[in-house]
Image: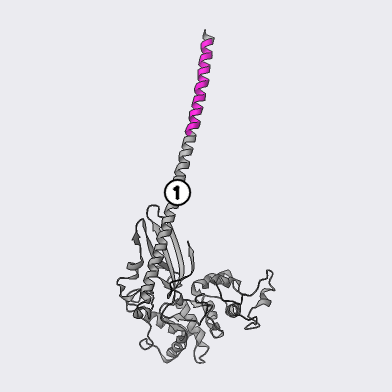
Amino acid sequence: MSKLLLRKFSSSGTILISVLWVVIILTILAISLGRRAHIESTLVKHALGQVKSNYLAWAGMAYALQEIDRDSQDPLSLAQDTLYRCAFQYDRGGSPEDLFKARAMADGYFSVEYVDTSIEQKGTLYYGPQDEERRININALTIHDIPILSALIVGLGFDERVATTIAHAVLDWKDEDDITLDTATGAEDDYYQSLSKPYRCKDRPFDAPAELLLVRAMTQEIYQAMAKYVTVFPKTGFLQVNFDTAPAIVLTALARGMVAAFPDMTVSNADTLVEKILRYRQGEDGVIMTSDDRVIDLNVMPLNSQERNLFLAMSRLRTSTSNYLRVRVKGVENARAAQTVIEAVVYRYDLSLLSWHRN
């Protein structure tokens, strides 16, 4: 009898252990499936948030284009673009921050903003469009402008001989002929075909600043330093720079590039002129991007005769209206804080997107 009971208890114990194992396995499966379902649900919600942020960013782009178009219809506003008011009407009221920061929409908001990475601003965040005419257009350079590009590279801390080589090679890269501007520093097919990994000289305008990495003597370090100061728009025409928006390094390159035309001038004359331009541009409060910023006026700025002559020489390259605008929009969906950033270069007069990329 005792043996029979023992067998029954043993059999019951085995069944109980089996049931417990089944329960444990089912519990593990349930937890695993629940976790997987939670992850999938989170991913779906994140994807939905990303889609919404994308539409918010494009809505912000449409809003910015509307402001640019409104500005272009106003002759008075169109005539002058400054750091504080670039490509939106002077009589709109409010600051750039009021018009372009965190504009609320159904499930989030968008901001039209940019980070000024120039040396003097060190990554300051501003609101509104940013003009391309603050940069040096490498497609618009002529043989007379070689000292300007060279001065830009030298001003960024690189060797003068390297800078001269790059400047000549840039013009050779974009011109239509196969003749080097300078036999010692230029570069056409014969140079590029002699490299260990040969390629052809483009002999066409630059389509993107990154093409500079293909140009003779260019390095990743030099390109990274100068990329924020150059543009490829427009692809034809002559060099035009907005003195009221250009950063110090660009104005310095223009001024130093002109010094050679004046036997009695030195680089220090150029640097002093740029300091005065920047100081005058800041207005009474001495701070850029505020409502009292001043438009550069040769007749009002306190310049000596040398500085005045140098400014007049630079002025052949001056424009006051910015026709090409860089619009960077960030769309943010509130629930998941998903973000999409779209950046485009816009032609003011038909609002076409000449280039754009997302995130």
Q: Is residue 255 above or below residue 213?
A: below
Q: Which residue is drawn at 49% across and 22% down?
A: 16
Q: Is mark 1 on a helix, strand or loop?
A: helix
Which is more toward the observer, 189 or 279?
189
User: What colour-coding does the image apply?
Assistant: one colour
Relative placement, left or right, of 93 versus 20 is left
Q: Is residue 189 above or below residue 329?
A: below
Asked whether 150 or 269 is in front, the reply is 150
Quarter occupied by residue 318? bottom left
Q: Name the residue under label 1.
A: 44
Query: What segment is highlighted magenta in the picture?
Result: 4-27
Indicate whether residue 281 is drawn in magenta: no
Q: Residue drawn 42% across and 89% down?
A: 308
The answer to whether one can see residue 111 in this image is yes
Residue 283 rendering spot, x and y as whole percentages: 34, 79
Give the image quarter of residue 181. Answer: bottom right
Q: Is residue 19 located in the magenta-colored stretch of the structure?
A: yes
Amino acid type of the residue that numbered disc 1 sits on in the rendered structure:
Val
